[in-house]
Image (tube, helix red, strand yellow):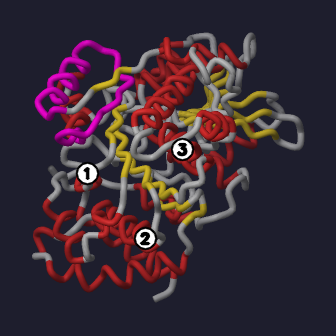
Amino acid sequence: MTYAEAVQFLYGLQMFGAKFGLENTFKLAALAGNPQAKLRFIHVAGTNGKGSTCAMLDSIYRAAGLRVGLFTSPHLVSFAERIQVNRQLISEANIVRLVTKLQPLLKEFPADAHPTFFEVVTVIALKYFAEQKCDLVIWETGMGGRLDSTNIVTPLVSVITNVELDHQKWLGNTLAEIAAEKAGIIKPGVPVITGASQPEAIDVITKTARERNSSLTQINFTETKTPPLDKINLPLLGEHQRLNAALAITTARVLGSQIPVSEDAIRAGLSQVEWPGRLQQIKAKSGQTILLDGAHNPSGAMALRDAIAKHFPGKKPALILGILQDKEWASICEILAPLAQKLFIVPVSSERTTAPEELERAIRKANPGAKVVVWNSLTQALEATAQDSFVVITGSLYLVGEALELLRHDQRGTPNERGLNEWSADR
């Protein structure tokens, strides 16, 4: 099998949708030798900030000298971004080898219960991390938590970054319903840490933690003003990232009796954390600043708006925007449109993209005086903004991934690997 054939096999799994439930993943992991039994995990769920919090935890524990596995999704450019050890992407050779190993196991499933793309990738990651003898795995949920494939593990600690409205079609229409799905990662006797703030969400998380005899620690912005965060120059922009950092610090301290980490390691880890596509600045040779952010729900859009106001005061960016149809695109437009006098609308490279004409109507309503142009592609929009000193590309991580590829900021991966992020849920 070649790498291209392995990627094609993974593409083929998309036809099985994204079914919610743990039965398939438990069975496939068992057929693969239950690699999760050899590993220790920090399990991270939440609406926003999961990936950033995972990146911070990974950086802290690497600074402490541990061999750390990192499992996240979606990827921006290369599928291999999803599975990393000490921030080294899994190699193409290892992807081919593990796909080859798992293929025969899939024959043990009936045709109407074939494992999905995410279920297979979850077990590939577990196999790889066990082979690599990781001391700790930072383990991000895909969507929700309770019925997410990642929930077959029993972690040392569970983290719920926050609870906002997103993926309502699958997780529920209220904060309480969504919180119940996120709180599904809480395991009996395993401590849980959260940065959630809405009373409806906190009530559900508190009740679940009490029922499972799990100690609950709540984090808020007060913790961002205390040592060591009061002195750390965090590389990731935005006040919301400082809250994510407080979550990571508290997690490391809660786990201190099991995995000791010095305050120096915490400071070092946070001071050098990297996480692409989240308020990521790229400086072009021309001096142009391009800000990439995957703000794909109203809460993320507000965080982006606040970060621009703080870090780029008085500047009006040229805004390139593309949003998926299953997101709250009208609300996102309402929040972001007033930030710019020039807005360039592009389709996201996904069958789930919102029609640019719909975005145009929402933007003109939110900012009637702005110049609004619809382009057929991100390439055209980038050419149109070549003379602008400050450009923001946002609305979807898929769009950010395409931008990174076009800007040649990430050379790994082929264009068709971004399509592996596509999915449709069959509950």
**Residue position for label 3:** 55
Q: Secondary structure at mark 3?
A: helix
**Residue position for label 1:** 154
Residue 243 image label: none
User: Which mark's residue is nearer the viewer, 2 or 1?
Assistant: 1
Quadrant of res 89: bottom right
Quadrant of res 343: top right
Q: Which residues are magenta?
A: 185-213
Give the residue displayed 52% in from the left and 64% down from the top: 80
How much space separates mark 2 and mark 1, taking CA atoms?
A: 18 Å
Which image quarter is the N terminus in? bottom left
Residue 128 image label: 2
Q: Secondary structure at mark 1?
A: loop
- Visible in this render: residue 209? yes
Type of amino acid under label 3 = Ala
Who comes first in sequence, dot 2 or dot 1? 2
Q: Residues within 10 Å of mark 2 (few under 14, many from 20)?
A: many
Type of amino acid under label 1 = Thr
Q: Residue 173 colored magenta?
A: no
Q: Residues within 10 Å of mark 1 (few under 14, many from 20)?
A: many
User: Which mark's residue is nearer the viewer, 3 or 1?
Assistant: 1
Who comes first in sequence, dot 3 or dot 2? 3
Quadrant of res 399: top right
- Tell which of 154 and 426 is nearer to you: 154
| Residue 39 image offset from top left, x and y in percent | 36, 61
| 229 horizontally vs 192: left or right | right
Give the residue displayed 56% in from the left and 24% down from the top: 242
- Tell which of 40 and 387 is nearer to you: 40
Q: Do residues under tags 3 and 2 come within 8 Å of each other at their CB atoms? A: no
Give the residue displayed 13% in from the left and 68% down from the top: 113
How much space separates mark 3 and mark 1, taking CA atoms?
A: 20 Å
